[in-house]
Amino acid sequence: MKCQSLLALFFPLLMLPGLGNAADPAIFAGYAHAAVPIGHGSVAAPATPASVAAPASPTAAPIGHGSVAAPTAPASVAAPAGHAAVAASTGKPQPQPIPEKMSCGVCGMYPASFPLWQTEIIFKNGKMVPFDGPKDMFKYLMNMVVFNKEQARADVAALWVKRHDNATWIDGETAYYVVGSSATGPMGAELVPFDSQVAAKGFQAKSGGMIKRYPEITIDMVSKLAMAGGK
């Protein structure tokens, strides 16, 4: 009885404009579609793809290798042992010390005893032959078939002579020689070497003789000096 009274009470209200449609299944169906399924929660929008990092610079060093150093210039190579050092200025082997008991390649005397007159020939294989004066050096050079049967003149790498005013080594092929002066060496009359024409002329003015360059020295000049005094 109470239920019928309540139904009678509320039924007219359901019929009011705007509320009667609330019972429409289509309306409830719309609410059903909008509902989120139980247990799934809200659905997140698709994540924006993370930005892709740019490839590493090609110049970057591989991991574990460290930075790559620039190529280094090859180290200079030392000359093989036993070979004469090469003079940077001339490209020729440097003069070598003359041992005390090493004899002259012509006369057999000891050039170490005559520092002012020392001369030497250095061959391409590094061998050195000393002399006690330019005269014997030229005699040897012009008669190698007699004094040296193992090497020829083409094997000569350098000629060294001593500058007469200060006993320093100078290139025998570029020197100025005063020939026929009053000066005498261990073996008598000599060719007196200088490294400049001015120095040679200064000596010539005091001691006489004639000035000659290396290509002008002949076997005849050397022979005449030998006859003038000494071996």
Image (tube, grey):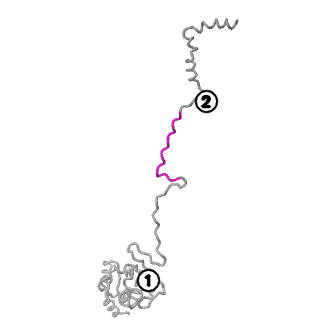
Residue in the picture at 50% in, 40% down: 51
Span highlighted in magenta in the image: 46-62
Instruction: Place residue 168 in its image quadrant.
Output: bottom left
Depth check, front residue: 43 or 124: 43
Instruction: Place residue 164 in its image quadrant.
Output: bottom left
Overall secondary structure of the magenta stretch? loop
Crowd around label 2: few <14 · some 14–19 · many ≥20 (10 Å): few
Judged left or right of residue 143, residue 62 is: right
Q: Position of residue 11 (x, y in %)?
A: 61, 8
Q: Secondary structure at mark 2?
A: loop
Q: Secondary structure at mark 1?
A: strand
Judged left or right of residue 1, residue 30 is: left
Q: Position of residue 93 (x, y in %)?
A: 41, 77
Which one is closest to the eye, mark 2 or mark 1? Answer: 2
**Amino acid type for the residue under numbered disc 1:** Met
* Residue, disc 1: 128
Q: CA distance from mark 2 to mark 1?
A: 103 Å
Q: Position of residue 103 (x, y in %)?
A: 45, 88
Vertical arrangement, residue 54 with respect to residue 194, above or below: above
Crowd around label 1: few <14 · some 14–19 · many ≥20 (10 Å): many
Instruction: Residue 226: say if magenta.
Output: no
**Amino acid type for the residue under numbered disc 2:** His
Instruction: Residue 54: say if magenta.
Output: yes
Mark 2 or mark 1, earlier in chain: 2
Instruction: Place residue 227 in its image quadrant.
Output: bottom left
Number of numbered discs on residues: 2
Q: Which mark is residue 40?
A: 2
Judged left or right of residue 110, residue 198 is: left
Residue in the picture at 35% in, 84% down: 192
Judged left or right of residue 132, residue 35 is: right
Tell me the quadrant of the picture where the C terminus can be found. bottom left
Q: Residue furthest right?
A: 1
